[in-house]
Image (cartoon, rainbow, N blue to C red):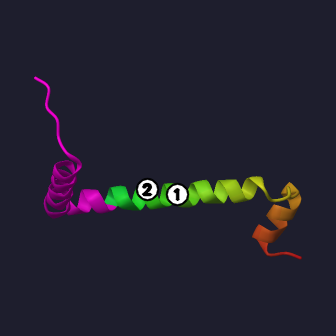
Amino acid sequence: MNMTMDAATLKQLLKEALGELLVENREDFLELLAEAIEDAAMIKAIQEGEDSPLVDKAEIFRLMDGTS
């Protein structure tokens, strides 16, 4: 059986599915959303780090220890 669906019907079905997800599995949805945001932030941090100059290991430990 070959079924076709127009864009408006698909959009409405997706809205309904997301609505049910939010109502029935709110905590799971929020957890997935938080993970997606964290992943995006990590990707951005990695990309920014790739463009920054390298720092000496001793300098990092000095900063972590709070010594000058």
**Relative to 55, does residue 10 appear above or below in the rendering?**
above
Residue 4, percent from left and from top: 17, 35
Mark 1, secondary structure of its residue: helix
Residue 62, percent from left and from top: 84, 67
- Residue at 55% x, 61% y is 41
Q: Residues within 10 Å of mark 2 (few under 14, many from 20)?
A: few
Write down the region rendered in magenta.
1-30
Label for residue 40? 1
Q: In the rendered image, which quarter is residue 6 located in?
A: top left
Mark 2, secondary structure of its residue: helix
On the image, numbered disc 2 is attached to which residue? 36
Label for residue 10? none
Q: In the rendered image, which quarter is residue 12 located in?
A: bottom left
Tell me the quadrant of the picture where the N terminus can be found.
top left
Look at the image and say whether residue 39 sits in the magenta stretch. no
- Discs 1, 2 touching: Cβ within 8 Å: yes
Q: Main secondary structure of the magenta part?
A: helix
